[in-house]
Amino acid sequence: RQGRGQGTQVRRRGISALGCAILLCGLISACATTIEGTAVRAGGPAPADVPQLSESDLERVLIRASAVNGIMGARGMEVVASSEDLSDNSDVVSDRDCLGAIYGAEKLVYGGSDWIAIRDQAAQEPHAANPHWGEQRAALYPSAAKARNFVEESKAAWQQCAGKSVDIDNGDVHSTWDLGDFRAEEAKSGLILTQLTEQRHAGGWGCQHALTSVSNVVVEAWACSNSIQDEAAAIVGQMQKNAQ
């Protein structure tokens, strides 16, 4: 398995905003159907009237590794990398229009959206055969309207990529990813996007990608394991609650 989430190094090279090395990861769903549905989030939605946040609030928006363990049914996951910047993987994907669906915190995706600051953090068990992997990020915007607009634009991109395959080739690793089941839910706290994607020949390893906003912050998460369900949606739901 290659590309996202599991392996002998801290993180996939040329894929994450963390700028670390490859972590093997596949994604679970081969489904290529666009579905409007209900994402499951831990603790229910955050209220829509959260006050505007500042850069100093971003750290508390991120959830603790212990909470990630609880959501993912894991033991021993810990923070293995963090970043305050974006990455650029536009040259390693076969379809740049799907860059925001297959990766997070990308310069090409966030560029021009007026983001101010970002916090990005990855967690896994600290050994090569880690059965779980997760990443969360919070991006600050000058207004709630700007944050919501980014989620709306992401919806269009993710939806058009459902059912497509994307090749990733960074010179060291080549892999093919099938972007599958896409959902967009309108909740009181705003629009919530989720998508499942499968890495071919990955042995059942799967990930869910989730994206939403709270006040003037965009929150995004990846959750990966061999039995993934709505864990990424649960992570962003908890991040919304942390923003209160």
Image (cartoon, helix red, strand yellow):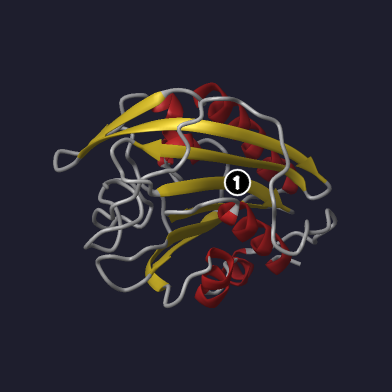
Q: Say which residue appears at 70% left-offset and 65% top-offset.
A: 243
Question: Which of the image's four quarters has the C terminus?
Answer: bottom right
Task: Classify residue 175 as left or right of residue 227.
Answer: left
The answer to whether residue 192 is above or below residue 140 is above
Q: Amino acid at mark 1?
A: Leu
Q: Residues within 10 Å of mark 1 (few under 14, many from 20)?
A: many
Q: Say which residue appears at 57% left-offset and 56% top-offset.
A: 231
Q: Which residue is mark 1?
A: 211
Task: Classify residue 70 as left or right of residue 198.
Answer: right
Circle 1: element type: strand
Which of the two residues, 46 or 144, is positioned nearer the viewer here? 46
Which of the two residues, 59 or 46, is positioned nearer the viewer here? 46
Q: Say which residue appears at 50% left-offset and 31% top-offset.
A: 180
The answer to whether residue 8 is above or below residue 127 is above
Task: Classify residue 189 as left or right of residue 174.
Answer: right
The answer to whether residue 194 is above or below residue 97 is below
